[in-house]
Image: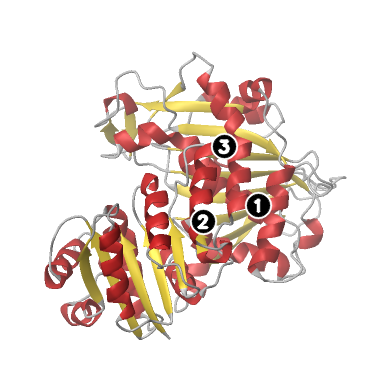
Amino acid sequence: MSFDLVLFGGTGDLTWRKLMPALFQAFRHGKLPRDGRILAVARDARSDDAYRAFIKERFAEVESAKRPNDEEFARFAALLFYRRMDLSHAEDYAALKAWLDERRADTTVMYLATSPHLFPVVCAQLGQAGLNGPQVRVVLEKPLGHDLASAQEINRVVAGAFSERQALRIDHYLGKPSVQNLSALRFGNALFEPLWRRESIANIQITLAESIGVGTRGDFYDRTGALRDMIQNHALQLLTMIAMEPPSTNDADAIRDEKLKVLKSLKPFTAETVARDVVRGQYKAGTVGGVPVAGYLEETKVPAGSATETFVALRAEVQNWRWAGVPFYLRTGKRLGARSAQITVNFRPVPHPIFPGSSRANKLVIKLQPEDGLELHLLAAKGGRQGEALAPVFLDLDFDKAFAAERVGAYERLLLDAIAGRLNLFVRSDEQEQAWRWVEPVLHAWANDAAAPRPYAAGTWGPPASSAMVARDGCVWDEEQ
């Protein structure tokens, strides 16, 4: 199969930090279709060879295992091309079309690795230039909008040029191998599904924690905040994967229909429930890994006195028969105690404990990063003696070790799926808009609240109010258990 992949924003951070290393890994693994071209477009003028040299230089900043040697890069670089484009000029799109028409590839993927405010401009221009035929797909990076209205406007313009099946809204968490295994875990095995309901599960926790601060992205982050950056997309997508009903097939729309039902079943927020069930915080100076670090307000490009949240913890409920009464706790933040992304499913304790210590509940931990695997926490008698107190043990499945040869990174998987037209791991417009509907009352409540985000020291797990919120239900966060 022949393909052309056009990277708008071809000199930006996303392209050289994530997309090029992922494309090289697909090339190295022999998974990238052989007859392909990768065209980077950006505002500055440079030759194909100058762009190849730029990418080779940037690979020095990629983790060593993902760097090509000189011979590998020479073969990979033969796929790379560059064009200068002004994204508002129709004549530049006409020139792009002429370049693509030189061979008319089986598939053309337009990857918008640009600022989201350019999405409507690029999509409209692509449509007017006739670069929206049935063989063309457009990939949209997050954040898709700043609120519901802006997301709807982006979707309106995109829909004017591309069909829903041509528009691929990317959420790289859905490309993580452990997230893909959520469906396999639930719907490919008989073990868990009978327990996957309110009668057996006490609560579910989703934690997306980063130990780093905002770095040099202070201006972008201050306009975004943790709720928009992580909860509205990544955390809610994970929640839908955990809570969805079994789809009738493995078809993309069957899966996305069930995810949408979950989003529509989320209990809406009111001003009162935001005050009770949502905690926002902002990191202050502290210590991470034994190294003193600055607070958010001291970071580069962060405005003085900013009220942008760097931490959010909230309590959600899915109002349907399977999950009624089961709290879902979502948490994300910068400068937390460790870099960790995981889902913890806490089961209810046995109804009638007959062993000392057996009131302690089982739990399933689905690890997304930095490790990738499953832990099933059980209780066992260490000495096997009658009446002995039970002790916690766990079964540990490390996906990286178990499937070392088959592991594919998130962006590598999503790029290959975009080229192949597999839609299962991309977000549909109605999912995206429903997620915005759910978080918007939180944004509105904060806009009308003069109180500043709660401070927390860098290197901790957020404001104490986060622990107090789950404690009202008799629960604790996983790292506190």
Nearest-to-viewer mark from 2 and 3: 2
Instruction: Say how many tags the image has.
Output: 3
Q: Quick one: 330 or 378, which is closer to the camera?
A: 330
Spatial CA distance of label 1 from label 3 is 25 Å
Q: Quadrant of the C terminus?
A: top right
**Percent position (x, y) of residue 239?**
63, 49
Q: Earlier in the sequence, mark 1 or mark 3?
A: 1
Q: Circle 1 is placed at which residue position?
A: 240
Q: Circle 2 is placed at which residue position?
A: 160
Nearest-to-viewer mark from 1 and 3: 1
SS for dot 2: helix
Q: Is residue 65 visible?
A: no
Q: Circle 3 is placed at which residue position?
A: 480
Spatial CA distance of label 2 from label 3 is 50 Å
Density class for disc 3 (Cα within 10 Å; few <14, some 14-19, many ≥20) is few
**Percent position (x, y) of residue 323?**
78, 46
Q: Earlier in the sequence, mark 1 or mark 2?
A: 2
